[in-house]
Every structure is written in structure tokens, then in C-alpha cells.
Amino acid sequence: MTVSVIAAWPDRFETVSLQLPVGTTAAEARKASGLGEGTCGMAVYGVLVDDLAILEDGDRLELLRPLLIDPKDARRKRAEARSVKHKKW
């Protein structure tokens, strides 16, 4: 079966197409791709999967990287920056 493994960073991405035996797990595909370094999770077409998920022919395994900042904190900082920018003295 054919599986694509994708790892994305803010400035680039890498993709590897693999021929794997039927019954291959997500963890095995990640290891076979050589792209697993620095990732913290996996998804198949955007749906989170664990290491033991069995992949199917044509799946796209996405390797997820850790968040650099909590999304709530990022939103709060953007809101604060906008409120300071729009304040009238």
C-alpha cells in the first residue's frame, strides 16, 4: 500500500511517499519516513491518531509539531495589541 508522510514547519514542509505492507501502524510509518524528529503527535487527514492506528492505502499521515505558544495566550496578546493601538488619549 502507498502512504504519504508529511511534516510541516512554519517555513517549509517535507513529504515522503512510502510503499508499506498492509497492516502498518502509524508509528511504523513515522519511523520508516525518517521525518519523526521533533514531532509530538500524528493525524490522518487531520484526525488525531495514536501510534497503534492501522493505516490504509492512500492515507496521508501528518506529523504534528508542538505548539510554540498556547492559542489562548496568542489571542489575548493580539487583542491587547489591538486595544493599545486603538486607544485615544
Image (spheres, rainbow, N blue to C red):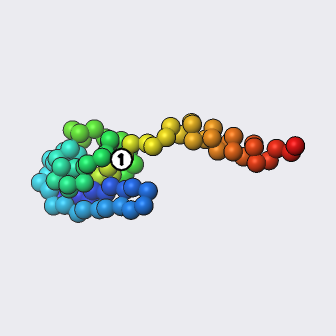
Placement of the C terminus among the 4 image quadrants: top right
Question: 83 or 72, which is in the foreground?
Answer: 83
Extreme front residue here?
89
Point 26% across, 48% down: residue: 37
Point 69% across, 40% down: residue: 80
Callout 1: 10 Å neighbours few (<14), some, many (20+)?
some
The picture places residue 73, in percent across and down from the top left corner, at 57, 37
Q: Is residue 49 left or right of residue 79?
A: left
Q: Is residue 67 left or right of residue 2?
A: right
Question: 38 or 45, which is in the foreground?
Answer: 38
The picture places residue 51, in percent across and down from the top left corner, at 23, 39
Asked whether residue 11 appears in the rendered view, the answer is yes
Per the image, the residue denoted by label 1 is 64
Point 53% across, 40% down: residue: 71
Point 14% across, 56% down: residue: 20
Placement of the N terminus among the 4 image quadrants: bottom left
Q: Is residue 78 left or right of residue 88?
A: left
Q: Is residue 79 left or right of residue 48?
A: right
Count of numbered marks:
1
Element assignment for label 1 = strand
The picture places residue 44, in percent across and down from the top left corner, at 33, 49
Residue type beneath disc 1: Leu
Asked whether residue 59 appears in the rendered view, the answer is no
Question: 21 or 40, which is in the foreground?
Answer: 40
Extreme left residue here?
21
The picture places residue 36, in percent across and down from the top left corner, at 25, 49
